[in-house]
Image: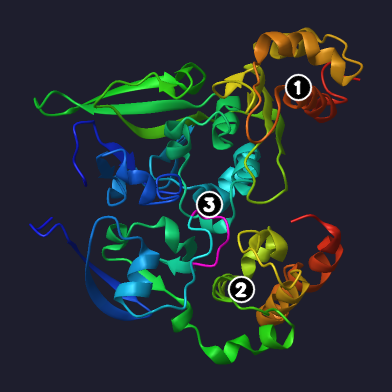
Amino acid sequence: MPDDGLIEVPLTINGAAVSVRVPPTDRLLDTLRYRLGLPGSKEGCGEGECGACTVWLDGLPVCSCLVPTFQCRGREVKTIEGVDAATLAPMLESGATQCGACTPGVVMMARWVAEHPEILGSHTMRELLAGNLCRCTGYDGIVEGMARMVGPKGTHHGGADSTEKKSRGERV
Amino acid sequence: MMAAGGTPPTPMAGCTDVLAHWPGNLAGKERAYLDLSGVGELRGVRWTGTHMQLGALATYWDVVTDARCVAEMPLLVAAARTIGAVQIQSRATWAGNIANASPAADGVPALMALDASVVLVSGNGGAGGLEREEVRLDEFYLGYKKLRMRTGQLIEAVRVPRRPRSVSIFEKVGARRAQAITKVGAAIARSDAGWRVVANSVAPTVRRCRAVEEMLEAGAVVRSPLGFAAALAKDVAPIDDIRSTAAYRRAVLGRVLYFALRGKAGVV
């Protein structure tokens, strides 16, 4: 660590190589929002409960409020700003968003499932969305939008149509 | 290492406990942290002929997505899937769950029911080389947040013996199914080594319920949840806290065990 107490962290964000100098206490969420001008990831709870800050770290969804930025050296981060907006139409059309606070996190989870539909062989969409709290929609719109985003790929694994409708009554 | 103070550094890996409410909870503590996340040798799940070995950086998601774990150690997979959500499972480590030593830990009872042991590694006083010690997980907790571990030792791995298990049950009672911290929990396994019944959130540490295990070994007839009450009075010591009450925990643990075990051993 240099004398100013800052740590140099080279990493890849949304496909672009960047390097930031951060205090050791910076969380990835802080670095994204306040040093890199990427305010799309939201801070809800700051303790890993709500999922509004969800990003991908080396291809897996994580709560960016629980990642120290210095742990991201040489790693790859994808944020809501790196998602192609055109892929979100199914969610908008399904009533998956109202106030929007949870939406960036929900989208990062939904896109992850859309890119890894094989996970629906072992997990329901509701289990995969368990880490994204929404206080507006009642979740049905989110699950439906995610199912439509995953598309027929998901149905091969019993995800979108067969499992989800049956699990509507489950507590999540 | 960061924020060096006088105390030995606390290892950090997945940071799902360390970073909650960060850095507010850091200020008063002046703690030093040792970041393990770059040590590649500590990653992942490894299989040998006799053991499954979780490196200190192995996450819950590593186990959830390991086909051999799904087939051979479903108890671990069941436990992992109840912990937080995918965003937590992708970061949180089994070793961190052990070291954090919460009585409500969900990974620990599953590992303990499978006779896991903890591999501790330490430097050899600067003489070069490493010293290793292996401690059974069911002997690792000496009291609330007290570990059988010396300053300078680090959890390097968790080892789980591979053996056929005819029973693998993971039960968790929380305020809701997802993202909840356990009010009452149990992990139950049976193998040639015998019955293992491990409870969490009902004592200062996660612990084996040895009196219940003895009942099951003996095939004692249990006709209702109350049939476990006398054994549980010896095995657990729940308290009232923000999540539940001692009375609820005692009553519900008996019910959890009874309904999970109905039709097995002497439980009718």
* Residue A51 is covered by the magenta coloring: yes
The Cα atoms of the two marked residues, 2 and 1, are separated by 41 Å
Task: Give the mark toward the camera: 2 or 1.
Answer: 1
Quarter holding the N terminus of chain B is: top left
Residue of label 3: B89
Residue of label 2: A110
Write down the chain letter for disc 1. Answer: B
Residue B170 x/y as whole percent = 69, 35
* Amino acid type for the residue under numbered disc 3: Gln
* Amino acid type for the residue under numbered disc 2: Ala
Residue of label 1: B247
Q: Is residue B212 above or below residue A152?
A: above
Q: Residue at x 11, y 60 (%)?
A: A4
Q: Which residues are magenta?
A: A47-53
Question: Which one is nearer the viewer's eye here, A52 or A119?
Answer: A52
The Cα atoms of the two marked residues, 1 and 3, are separated by 31 Å
Write down the chain letter for disc 2. Answer: A
Q: Is residue A144 above or below residue B257?
A: below
Write down the chain letter for disc 3. Answer: B
Q: Is the image coloured rainbow, by chain, by secondary structure, or in one colour?
A: rainbow
Question: Which one is nearer the viewer's eye here, B16 or B80?
Answer: B16
Quarter location, residue B65: bottom right
Quarter location, residue A59: bottom left
SS category of the residue bearing label 3: helix
Which numbered tag is attached to residue B100?
Answer: none
Q: Residue at x 68, y 8 (%)?
A: B234
